[in-house]
Image (cartoon, rainbow, N blue to C red):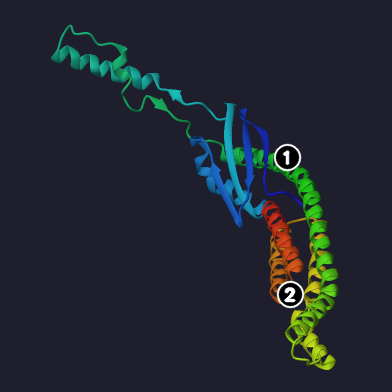
Amino acid sequence: MRSMTGFGVGDAALGEGRVSVELRALNHRFLEVRVRLPDELVDLSFFVEQMAREKLTRGRFDVGVRLEGAALPPPRFSVERARALYSGLAALRDELSPGSDLGLSVLAGMPGLVIAPSRPDFDSARGALREAFDAALQRLAEMREQEGRALERELLARLESARRLRSAIAERGGQMLEGYRTRLRERLERLLADSGVQVEPNRLESELVIMADRSDVTEELVRLDSHFTQFSKLLGLEGPVGRRLDFLLQEIGRESNTIGAKSQDAPIAHLVVEMKAELERIREQVQNVE
């Protein structure tokens, strides 16, 4: 199991410099990739995004690329163009304003004096980007696995707490019927104390049977136990399990709600509230699971 958050950096040689890739992972329900490249490599944005989508799963990923050193051929200043432009300006000066000053600063705003490289070697750039990305991905995976182990320990502890609450509900369910029997008998005896009418045992038992049937949560407790077991097994699997854990939490929440609705018993209601609070803590952590 791995966390959805993490950070990794990798680099590779390119030209006389290096290209560096930073990979940052954040929580997200689906796969979202955002790419930032320097102007010199902006034509490779689609290549980098597709490479990331092939190797990444659920989450939001920010991919940043930086160039270091002379990774690409530098722009070239055209001395020939500058000389021709200055000669033309000097001739125009001599014609229109003889003797006026004409400094080299007039060339600063002239277009076409700085010539970009004819075209970067995109084949070499793709290879270097792939190598740097793989190195960043490896470091990201190591960090996410480390955080995933901490998440697993936290979720197992929370799951054990939910199991204890489920056991307490089951135990209280066995005591609830006897408590209801006592309260019902005492209530009837108070109501009939002055009438001389005796409580009919068969009628009392019939009421208890109806009450027991309406408040029986055995099926819900069995399903809860099954869901807890599946949840625990998923925590031990490799690969993305976040969505399956989230689905199981929905089912666990549904069973908990049913138990709370069926059990007209204050202690069980309190236990259900505690379980819901524990499930919410688990849900918050599951959002960080890949």
Q: Label for residue 263?
A: 2
The amino acid pointed to by label 2 is Ser
Q: Is residue 243 left or right of residue 216?
A: left
Q: Is residue 97 left or right of residue 51?
A: left
| 25, 264: nearer the viewer | 264
Residue 245 placement: quadrant = bottom right
Q: Secondary structure at mark 2?
A: loop
Q: Does the image show residue 237?
A: no
| 16, 22: nearer the viewer | 22
Q: Residue 237, how many percent across, how many down?
A: 81, 57
Check the picture and name the quadrant holding the C terminus: bottom right
Q: Residues within 10 Å of mark 1 (few under 14, many from 20)?
A: some
The amino acid pointed to by label 1 is Arg
Q: Label for residue 139?
A: 1
Q: Secondary structure at mark 1?
A: helix
Please identify, in this view, whether the residue under mark 2 or under mark 1 is nearer the observer.
2
